[in-house]
Image: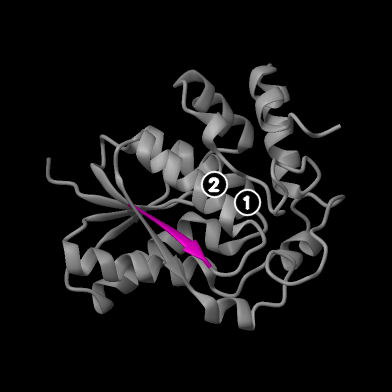
């Protein structure tokens, strides 16, 4: 197999489905998880470790303490996570982290250049691309073009979910029996998914739309 790939793994729904859907096609060997001081960093790292172990790939955690210092949005700061806004301009600004995907992909590209990875996989999707410009195919294509100048290996950035919304993503996870019970999609640092933040609401809604009851109980067991 010629492909040898690296994946950005947050431990959430999108990164799981990316990993489960294309692990063999792209020969994913390494997962990177980033700790930039986000409220749910501990939970995301634990979930990512479990997913990497499940799929038998190497896992590394990269700490970016400087990003917490310059980030003033709700994912990191003491501000409350928005609960009543779903993919609006307000909610996007509330959880925006400066150049996050650009930074993560550039770090992954450095790994690719050193260890000869041909592709970098990340979980950009159609739904989030509406409000987050770094979750679009245009962004993936442009940063791939930049790597022609900043790397020797010229890795390709791949977003397998780019044409899918949350309903589609959950449907694929259920059809392929992916281990949703190992994921962590919540923005908050509560022990279990809070069920109230934007990420939780979209996941729960997608599970309902797909007729699921099992994972609603598993992932939101402590939520009233």
Residue 107 location (% of width, % of height): 36, 70
Q: Can you tell which mark lies on residue 46?
A: none
* Image: magenta residue range: 31-35
Residue 84 location (% of width, % of height): 87, 50
Residue drawn at point x = 30 percent, y = 38 percent: 56
Q: Which residue is mark 1?
A: 128
Q: Closer to the camera, 162 or 75?
A: 75
Mark 1 to mark 2: distance in Å?
A: 6 Å
Q: How is the image coloured?
A: one colour
Residue 82 in magenta stretch? no
Q: Closer to the camera, 54 or 185?
A: 54
Is 88 placed left or right of 199 in the picture? right
Residue 162 visible to an observer of this rendering: no
Mark 1–mark 2 CB contact (< 8 Å):
yes
Residue drawn at point x = 47 percent, y = 39 percent: 16
Residue 69: name its quadrant.
bottom right
Dot 1: element:
helix
Q: Closer to the camera, 117 or 160?
A: 117
Dot 2: element:
loop
Residue 152: name its quadrant.
bottom left
Q: Closer to the camera, 68 or 116?
A: 68
Q: Which residue is mark 2?
A: 125
Q: Main secondary structure of the magenta part?
A: strand
* Screen quadrant of the C terminus: top right
Residue drawn at point x = 77 percent, y = 60 percent: 91
* Screen quadrant of the N terminus: top left
Relative to 66, say whether 48 is above or below: above
Q: How busy is the neighbourhood of tag 1: few (under 14 within 10 Å), some, or many (20 plus)?
A: some
């Amino acid at each position: 197999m010629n492909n040898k790939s690296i994946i950005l793994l947050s431990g959430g729904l999108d990164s799981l489905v990316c990993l489960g859907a294309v692990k063999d096609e792209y020969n994913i060997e390494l997962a990177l998880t980033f700790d930039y001081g986000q409220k749910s960093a501990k939970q995301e790292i634990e979930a990512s470790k479990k997913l990497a172990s499940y799929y038998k790939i190497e896992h590394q955690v990269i700490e970016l303490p400087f990003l917490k210092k310059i980030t003033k949005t709700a994912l990191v700061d003491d501000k409350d996570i928005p609960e009543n806004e779903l993919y609006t301009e307000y909610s996007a600004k509330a959880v925006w982290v400066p150049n996050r995907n650009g930074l993560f992909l550039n770090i992954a590209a450095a790994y690719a250049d050193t260890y000869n990875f041909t592709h970098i996989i990340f979980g950009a999707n159609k739904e989030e691309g509406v409000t987050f410009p770094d979750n679009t195919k245009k962004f993936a294509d442009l940063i791939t073009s930049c790597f022609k100048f900043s790397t020797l290996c010229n890795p390709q950035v791949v977003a397998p979910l780019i044409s899918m919304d949350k309903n589609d993503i959950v449907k694929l996870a259920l059809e392929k029996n992916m281990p949703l019970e190992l994921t962590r999609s919540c923005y908050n640092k509560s022990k279990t998914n809070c069920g109230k933040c934007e990420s939780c609401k979209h996941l729960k809604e997608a599970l309902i739309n797909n007729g699921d009851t099992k994972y609603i109980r598993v992932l939101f067991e402590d939520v009233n």
